[in-house]
Image: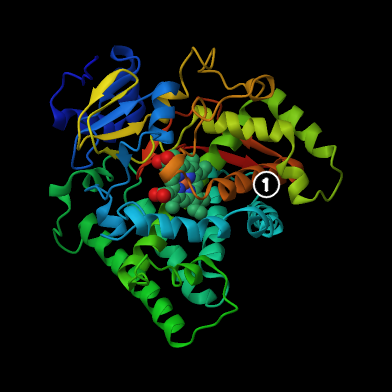
Amino acid sequence: MKQIEGLRLPTWLQKIHYVTNPVSYWESAYQTYPDAFWAKGIDFGSPLMVFYTPEAAQQIIENRHGNLTTTSFDSELRAIFGDSSFFTLEGVRHQSVRKLLIPALHGKQIHSYGKLICDLADNLMGELPTNKPFSALDVAQEISMRVMIQLLFGSYQQERYEQIKQLMIGMVNLFASNIGGIPLFFRFLQKDLGPASPWRNFLNQRQQMQDLIYTEIEERRAHPNPAQKDILALLMLACDEQGNLLTNEELLGQVLSLLFTGNESTAASMAWSWYRVYRDSEIHGKLLQELQSLGDSPDPIGLFRLPYLSAVCNETLRMYSVTMFTIPRVVKTTTQIDGFQVNPGTLVTVGTYLLHQREDIYPTAKEFKPERFLERQFSPYEFLPFGGGMRGCIGAEVALYQMKLSLATIVSHYQLELVNHRPINPQRRNTILTPINLMMVKY
Ligand code: HEM
């Protein structure tokens, strides 16, 4: 049986490497270990094994023999989400919250947001001044944040939701830079070092956010309104097998997890798709032609189903796998994954970033080629930007809807250009790979 190995660098150095340049960290591991490695640079409180073959992905996602389970690990992200987030829920309660949320984030429910997304993208783009560079990521973040807030809270307390949105953007930006983001990943730096320190700032903003969300929850408990069908309303009805409702702290954890993970990953993926389309006039031309075939006021579902638009978004999700890996699962009993021995207590994950760069699955993987998704169907273990199985992304449909509709709206109605054509490399913002420096201009 094969034994898994790790990079021969001290753990603290690997951590700095991962935090400051995750893509280079992944690629240096891949050059030495083509299928799997110990990722000592990523701190989940226990050793993390990263696998990036379709065979391993299938074993981890399918979990056919039940050797793996969801777990509450000691993640660096506890500082943001608290002790009761989606990422720390396990077992029955995790499954019951998933079951409740999945219908709220699929099918008809999501399609009813189609016009909202198109209008938001249109209005935000329309408001931007012409001939003045703007940050693509900021615009994408505004779109996805507004959609998320609507999904989470509906539209009852607009003023409060606007405050939540502003705090959220502030918190995301606090750790945006490589250096500024370091405290998020090194727990010993998570200390209040006085009024000007980033950690104090973070704690203040998190406290304000917590107060606003608790006020919202208390008001809803005091005045229940059965007409409210937003995600918070659904979460407030969730019970475990003993019939216990989620506590306020657990509700806060879920709301923060949805706001943070859903927003950052969707905004980054949207911005990456704009980057690729406006970088290549041939891709832009093909997309515009396809969009024009639907006439002047296309139905959002019709847009969602367009093959080339879908291929562009899939290729974006492949090339820029913004989350980089799936949520770790814990191994219960000694097992083998893709021929490697894995012992109980180990955390395992699918390294989607590396899997999506494999030349044996995606020839000329470093090139952006939407056509590959028209020419071939990839299996759910070759292409898995949203993971799968027990922890598969519950927001995949919402995310794809936002990506496709915002791209379609922008390409159909606006003339944009990249401010410069130098390649933009993915940089970590919080836990997501983003095009931080992508500037565009509207004519
Ligand atoms: C392009 C955008 C997005 C990407 C690439 C993405 C990717 C992922 C991935 C890779 C996972 C882990 C899956 C696994 O471990 O098997 C995940 C989990 C999750 N995602 Fe997303 N996601 C996106 C958007 C969203 C949105 C919009 C929401 C909320 C509406 C969301 C909510 C979640 C939640 C709650 C989990 C944890 C599920 C669990 O623990 O059971 N995501 N996402």
Q: Position of residue 81 (x, y in %)?
A: 31, 57
Q: Position of residue 388 (x, y in %)?
A: 47, 39
Q: Is residue 180 left or right of residue 155?
A: left
* Residue type pointed to by label 1: Leu
- Outermost residue toward the front? 65
Which residue is labeled 1 in the image? 405
Determine whether 28 is above or below 197 in the image: above
Determine whether 16 is above or below 177 in the image: above
Q: Is residue 102 left or right of residue 284?
A: left
Picture residue at 38% right of the left edge, 52% below the top: 172
Q: Where is residue 135 in the image (x, y as percent from the top left)?
A: 52, 45
Q: In which quarter of the image is the N terminus?
A: top left
Quadrant in the picture for residue 245: bottom left
Quadrant in the picture for residue 206: bottom left
- Asked if residue 259 shows in the view, the reply is no
Q: Quadrant of the C terminus?
A: top right
Picture residue at 27% right of the left edge, 45% below the top: 180
Determine crowd level at label 1: few under 14, some 14-19, many 20+ residues with C-alpha closer than 10 A.
Answer: many
| Element at label 1 | helix
Q: In this view, does 10 lie to the left or right of 357?
A: left
Picture residue at 31% right of the left edge, 30% below the top: 21
Q: Position of residue 187 (x, y in %)?
A: 16, 48
